[in-house]
Image (spheres, rainbow, N blue to C red):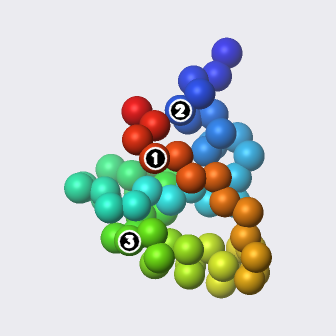
Amino acid sequence: MYDFTGSIGFTSKNATYIIGAQDPGYARGTGLKTRAAFEEALQDVKKKYLGDHPNILLCQRLL
């Protein structure tokens, strides 16, 4: 059985970003990418993974 909060991000992904982390070192240590703002993360995703028309799953306040 998967933990819903982590299974989507870790089982089927190109990358998982944490936006505005208070201590980004912990997130990076678990293999996540950190960015200060959503716009910054979106530009990175478009450039590295998805092109000009990305499909994005955004989970606000999941926990």
Q: In terms of secondary structure, where does tag 3 sit? A: loop
Residue at far left of view? 22
Query: Mark 3 or mark 1, which has the lower sequence index?
Result: 3
Please provide percent x and percent y for residue 30.
45, 48
Judging by the rendered image, the residue that carries numbered circle 3 is 37
Quadrant in which residue 20 is drawn = bottom left
Mark pair 3, 1: CA separation: 13 Å
Residue type indicated by callout 1: Gln
Is 17 placed above or below 38 here? above
Judging by the rendered image, the residue that carries numbered circle 2 is 5
Judging by the rendered image, the residue that carries numbered circle 1 is 60
Which residue is painted at 62% across and 73% down in the image?
45
Is 43 placed above or below 22 here? below
Quadrant in which residue 42 is drawn = bottom right
Please provide percent x and percent y for residue 19.
40, 61
Residue type indicated by callout 3: Ala
Residue type indicated by callout 2: Thr
